[in-house]
């Protein structure tokens, strides 16, 4: 009786070439109005399966602590993973080229209509939608915490601490990340070393 081997990172789908990487990331970036995290996770993990959910969480964590936009950092890491330094450059260009043209065009339009009350109201509404996207994605990614060495309760405590520091106490994000993220890293290291 023959058994089919479990899929590995080698047999998992991957971009066929640099062109596919560029256009996939361009398409992904053009979908990201107001918050791209949900779109990135759905495209890279669920649809294309270029990353597992655990790999996505780990890469996203690294992308967040690096300077620059998170999703751009992730696209550089993804490109480098599959095609080396050329992939990193193509990932960066795919994530920025066409969105930059859209942003420049929208900026030119906005300067013409910025005094309109309808435009101001629309922008406030978009802010609420962006907050909802971030909250929804946070809840969706929380399912991966069952595999974390600290367990769900410690991770929930760290998330609450981060929220309290940033939203309630108005601590700058850099210091909150350093304090809570550093604590999380230290606690995880101790748990893994034990």
Image: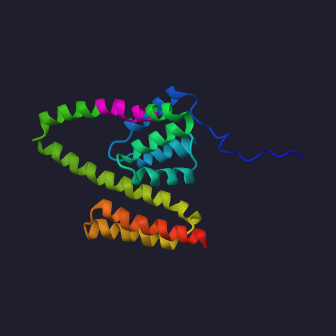
Q: Is residue 191 visible?
A: yes
Q: Is residue 44 left or right of residue 109?
A: right
Q: Could you say which is closer to the camera, residue 54 or residue 194?
A: 194
Image height of 144 relative to 49, above or below: below
Residue 18: x and y in percent read 51, 28
- Residue 151 visible somewhere in the drawing: no
State the extent of the magenta-drawn residues as a range.
Answer: 91-101
**Is residue 118 inside the magenta stretch?**
no
Residue 93 part of the magenta segment: yes
Quadrant assignment, res 190: bottom right
Residue at (27%, 34%) from the top-left corner? 103
Left or right relative to 175: residue 54: right
Give the x, y percent position of residue 41.
48, 47
Residue 150 location, x and y as percent?
A: 54, 70
In the orientation shown, which residue stands out farthest toward the right?
1
At a point 39% along the width and 45% down the height, the residue shown is 36
44 to 131, vertically: above or below:
above
Q: Position of residue 159 (x, y in %)?
A: 41, 67
Majority secondary structure of the magenta segment? helix
Residue under the point 55% across and 51% down:
55
């Amino acid at each position: 009786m023959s058994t089919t081997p479990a899929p590995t990172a080698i047999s998992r789908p991957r971009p066929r070439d640099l062109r596919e990487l560029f256009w996939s990331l361009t398409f992904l970036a053009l979908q990201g109005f107001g918050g791209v995290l949900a779109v990135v996770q759905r495209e890279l993990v669920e649809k294309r399966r270029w990353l597992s959910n655990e790999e996505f969480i780990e890469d996203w964590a690294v992308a967040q602590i690096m300077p620059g936009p998170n999703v751009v950092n992730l696209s550089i890491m993804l490109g480098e993973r599959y095609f080396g330094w050329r992939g990193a450059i193509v990932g960066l260009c795919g994530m920025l080229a066409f969105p930059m043209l859209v942003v420049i065009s929208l900026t030119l339009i906005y300067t013409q209509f910025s005094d309109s009350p309808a435009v101001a109201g629309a922008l406030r509404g978009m802010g609420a939608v962006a907050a909802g996207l971030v909250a929804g994605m946070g809840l969706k990614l929380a399912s991966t915490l069952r595999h974390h060495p600290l367990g769900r309760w410690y991770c929930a405590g760290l998330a609450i601490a981060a929220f309290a520091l940033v939203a309630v106490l108005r601590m700058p994000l850099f210091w909150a990340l350093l304090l809570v993220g550093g604590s999380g890293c230290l606690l995880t290291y101790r748990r893994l070393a034990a």
